Image: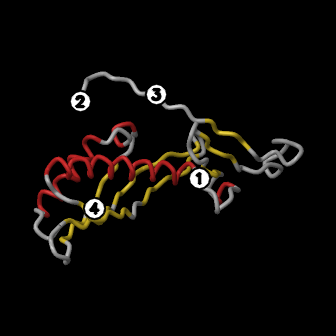
Amino acid sequence: MAKNREHHYQVIVEWLGNRGTGTSNYSSYSRDHEIIATGKASISGSSDPAFRGDQTRWNPEELLVASLCACHKLWYLHLCAVAGIAVLAYRDEASGTMVEEEVTGGHFTSVVLRPHVTVRAQDDTGLALKLHHDAHVKCYVANSVNFPVTHEATVIRSEADAI
């Protein structure tokens, strides 16, 4: 990989919540918004329901946890492919903890990734587990946050015949 390359990302977040009087008071507006990027399906967003948001829409906190999950997974799949390990299934049941504070508003204190991975029957599960550490080291998103991101990975072998 070339060193010091820059990548730029552009998104539009358009607020949809003016109910006629804008933000005239805390209860007068919806937190709904759309997250838009050229050529992609938009994402319906809001705030967490604890902050008057719509529970059927993604909130920024969920998107942060999802971003950490996706980055880890993508690095992990890459590293497994290079190492000759065939990942047959991958599911991460991650959780994040955020605390509210009066002065700063709040911050995340941790995110725990819990990837459950199935590999081929003949693959080395020890190496497959180690590659989670390597994926964590390389994950751009995890390297960009100021709170611990840990993983509690499980790797099992497929019971089906080898691929």
* Residue 109 coordinates in the image, percent (x, y): 42, 50
Residue 130, relative to residue 91: is it above or below?
A: above
Name the N-terminal-most of marks 2 and 1. 2
Task: Give the image quarter of residue 143.
Answer: top left
Q: In the figure, is residue 160 to the left or right of 67?
A: left
Location of the N terminus (image quadrant): top left
Q: Which mark is residue 152?
A: 4
* Residue 5 coordinates in the image, percent (x, y): 33, 23
Name the N-terminal-most of marks 1 and 3. 3
Disc 3: CA contacts within 10 A as few (<14), some (14-19) or many (>=20): few
Frontmost of labels 2 and 1 is: 2
- Per the model, the C-alpha gap separating discs 4 and 2 is 28 Å
Q: Check disc 4 and give the amino acid type.
A: Glu
Closer to us: 69 or 74: 74
- Per the model, the C-alpha gap separating discs 4 and 3 is 31 Å
Q: Which residue is mark 3?
A: 8
Q: Check disc 3 and give the amino acid type.
A: His
Frontmost of labels 1 and 3 is: 3
Is disc 2 in contact with disc 1, using a CB cutoff of under 8 Å? no
Q: Which residue is mark 1?
A: 59
Name the N-terminal-most of marks 4 and 3. 3
- Per the model, the C-alpha gap separating discs 1 and 3 is 23 Å
Instruction: Give the residue drawn at x 27%, y 40%.
Output: 138
Q: Check disc 1 and give the amino acid type.
A: Asn
Task: Label 1: state its secondary structure.
Answer: loop
